[in-house]
Image (spheres, rainbow, N blue to C red):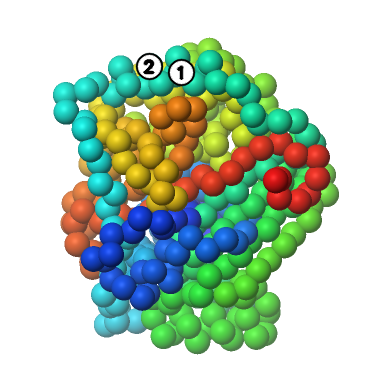
Amino acid sequence: MNSDIDAIRTLLNPHDPAAGVDPAVSGASLTAILGDAPGPRPVRRAWGRRAVMFAGAGVAAVAIVGVAGVVVLPGHDEPGTKARAATPPLLTYHGSGSTRARDVLLRLAERAERRPDTAGTGRYAYVRTRDWGLDGQGDAKGETSSAVIVTTSEQWLAADGSGRQRYEYGPPYFPTEGDRRRWEQIEKNDGGIVAPGKADHRFGPHGIPFRLAWRTLSDNPVTLRKQLYAANSISDDGQVERLVDIEHLYSEQPIRPAIAAAALRVVADIPGLRYDGTTTDRAARTGVAVSVEWNGPDIPQRYTLIFDPNTGRLLDSEQVLTRAVKGWNVKIPAVIGYTVFLKSSFTQRLDPPK
């Protein structure tokens, strides 16, 4: 399990969205949180999404956040307070039938490798995503607070680890009033995340850690699978973590057609993979979806990847809680995380590509 803040970001790493949200789902607050308003925020990619353990200065919390509310789980400092959780709407899938996921992905891989390479060239690998998630911050005295914040992330990453990260934070939603008070006090006394607001950071060499970007990745699926596995030290979620590997691949850099095709072939060979059909993702794009189920003790979940049916590139990832977990005030099945990949390319400048 990662350390405090990283562990929080590890679960709820999702992004943007929301054209095409079901109008039956909670009105104003859902629209405000999921609205596809433009904005930026740095890429804080998590290596594996799982239950969030937020521990610090004697405060422990496990939390799942929802779009129009939060779920406060046992162990928080205000156990009597539970907000009604309004999670994002489930995506709707069509036309899965008896089609095998492997067949779909292998055909898509053939299509992907014939596509023109539009990633461009340049000093920086640029990736823009949209997330909603649980953020945490602390002060010098060890006081900690957490909040649900919708953000847009942009990252410019050079081969030497220099670059830029830019964030735009939406309004914070707090698990408890105690979190709100502590958050505001930390902002006042120690700085930290200001939400709503923006943050923009420049880094010199070795300033941005990365694992896969600027590596020589193989277009041989057997070799690529080994490279992805080596970059992800978390393997306790089995097949789910293999899908997370693909998400990591796309989180740091643009993916060229040959590597996109190899990645699809890697996914095609994951045991237990299911084809869910076509869907419209949270940025209103059509995609083909595959998923695996994991029934582990911590977070029983269905993990879904959605690919562009023309380019084979990853559009969206979805994490759905499939079985009730004690203390989690959500209706099963419940979306507990998603990530939308909005744009990526190589660029010579520390400005958003055209």
The residue nearer to you, when weighing 25 against 68, is 25
Graded by Cα atoms within 10 Å as few (under 14), some (14 to 19) or many (20 or more), the crowding at tag 2 reads some
Q: Amino acid at mark 2?
A: Arg
Residue 200, above or below 246: below
Q: Position of residue 7 (x, y in %)?
A: 48, 55
Q: Position of residue 280 (x, y in %)?
A: 35, 44
Q: Is residue 236 visible?
A: no
User: Left or right: where does residue 353 sit relative to residue 226?
Assistant: right
Identified at 78% across, 49% down, the residue is 350
Q: Position of residue 90 (x, y in %)?
A: 27, 53
Residue 157, above or below 191: above
Quarter-wise, where is residue 215 in the image? top right
Identified at 68% across, 79% down, the residue is 190
The total of numbered circles placed on residues is: 2
Q: Amino acid at mark 1?
A: Arg
Residue 159, above or below 105: below
Quarter-wise, where is residue 332 in the image? bottom left
